[in-house]
Amino acid sequence: MNENQVSTYLPNKNTWKGISITKNAIKQILFLINLNPDNIGIRLSIRKSGCAGFRYTMKLVKNTEVKTKQEISFFYKNILIYILYKDMPFLEGVRIDFVKNNINKIFKFYNSKLEKFCGCGESFSIN
């Protein structure tokens, strides 16, 4: 995709597969949102990072933040979610889980479309 295609990407509601969030992740996201009355939702995105090139990010959104023209917002099981249009192709079909392994607790992003990951599993490349 060139820059113009990415910035003007508009999802087709009939073909965009969206995202899915497991029950464990929903519970943890709602817990984090409810820690502060100013929190209203989450923002999902990708950014350049790691040895493979990109990583998924999730940040809390405060009620003082305004949705930009470059974003879509929607509710998923009572969670307000913001995604930049340019990131939607890379988030399409992603499943978000919250995993507890001994003392480690982490959100994991699973995307069956991606083929190349770094050894630590923190970043991925886009072919």
Image (cartoon, grey):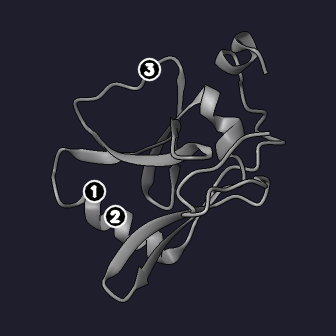
Residue 57, label in figure: none
Q: Looking at the image, which is closer to me, 9 or 122? A: 122
In the picture, residue 85 is in which quadrant?
top right
Residue appearing at x 43%, y 55% in the figure: 79
Q: Earlier in the sequence, mark 3 or mark 1?
A: 1
**Quick check: 75 above or below 46?**
below
Task: Name the residue tied to disc 2.
Answer: 30
Task: Name the residue tied to disc 1.
Answer: 33
**Which quarter of the image is occupied by the C terminus?**
top right
Residue appearing at x 79%, y 55% in the figure: 115
Most extreme residue toward the right is 15
- Horizontally, residue 15 falls left or right of residue 29, namely right
Residue appearing at x 35%, y 78% in the figure: 104
What type is the residue that disc 2 sits on? Leu
Task: Name the residue tied to disc 3.
Answer: 68
- Horizontally, residue 81 falls left or right of residue 91, namely left
Q: Secondary structure at mark 3?
A: loop
Residue 108 horizontal/vertical position (percent): 52, 65
